Image: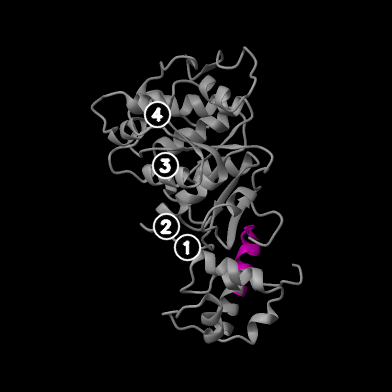
Amino acid sequence: MDNRGLLDLIVSVMPGLKAKEKIKILNLFRREEDLYILSKNHIEEIINRKIKKNWDISDIRDKADRIDTICRMRSIKWVSFTDANYPPLMREIYDPPAVIYYKGRLPDPEKPLLGMAGTRKPSPEGSSQAYKLAFEAGKAGISVVSGLALGIDSMSHRGNLAGGAPGYAVLGSGVDEIYPSTNRPLAKKIIDSNGALVSEYPPGVRPSKWSFPARNRIISALSRSVLIVEAPQKSGALITAGFALEHGKDLWTSSSGVRQSIYDKRGTIKLAQDGAEIIYSQDDIFKKWNMEVSDNAGNEEVSGGKTGDIVFSTADYLNIKI
């Protein structure tokens, strides 16, 4: 630990502060001892507003110390906004987390990530296309970042790992609280791939309704482009799409997401109507990223079907194990 001590972790758990206010405090101080002489009133003067919640700086320091101890016991790392290893693209958003926690290895800042998101209840075609696009991205060395949820997220992670790329999942909980629990094996595969589980929440924090929309901004922030595969009219994936637009990212939807069917795809259909480009195959992604990929890409078989065509059965995708 450097001479900042637990300063950054202390600030990150201060209640009642907005993300931008925490960053402001981080940039003002250099040592954790500098905070001990401050009261809540001093902090209010710095952020120029009243803080509704009551707290004592000593209690907050104790909480930060407990979190740091738990992290070391559970092989969880944390990195602050002030650290050189903090993901650079996350610095550019309006409300970056003061601290992020992770298990595994953070993504290489020199290698762009593809954000993928979608409904938890996709059509068989949507599941197939999510897996196939992520698989071919992985073969080309492109890692996918998604949210480890059921449906499109899971298929995207699995396809990408099968393609040989490190995987990245952003959680709406602490990185030791895998949700859904059925995805614990998938989470382990992501870590074993030299990828990472990432969260702005300390260990032990359970998921909540408000934490999932918040984590979507991190998925967008880490991505070069964001692909919404399928989404109904009311979907958390559309929140990710909104952050992508706010962050100035490429926003795409898949061809399966705009085809009419018995599944609700009104969210992705609306995205396309509003100008989101449609991705039909991995080649579209490679062209938009100005990537040269060998002619063999896209011609290998996956689960019995050629990746150039969507020929996988529903059973294939419901039972994929990696």
**Residue 60 locus on image (x, y percent):** 56, 78
Q: Secondary structure at mark 4?
A: helix
Q: Which residue is mark 4?
A: 127
Q: Nearer the viewer, residue 17 or 24?
A: 24
Mark in front: 2 vs 4 = 2
Q: Are marks 1 and 2 in contact (CB under 8 Å)?
A: yes
What residue appears at the point 43 percent right and 60 percent down from the top-left corner? 206
Q: Which residue is mark 2?
A: 211
> How many numbered badges does the structure rendering display?
4
Q: Is residue 23 above or below residue 125?
A: below
User: Based on the displayed image, in which of its 4 quarters is residue 259 positioned?
Assistant: top left
**Residue 188 locus on image (x, y percent):** 56, 44
Q: Which residue is mark 3?
A: 241
Query: Which kind of residue does numbered mark 2 sit on?
Result: Ser
Query: Which kind of residue does numbered mark 3 sit on?
Result: Ala
Choose the circle earlier in sequence order: 3 or 2.
2
Structural distance between the alpha carbons of marks 2 and 4 = 25 Å
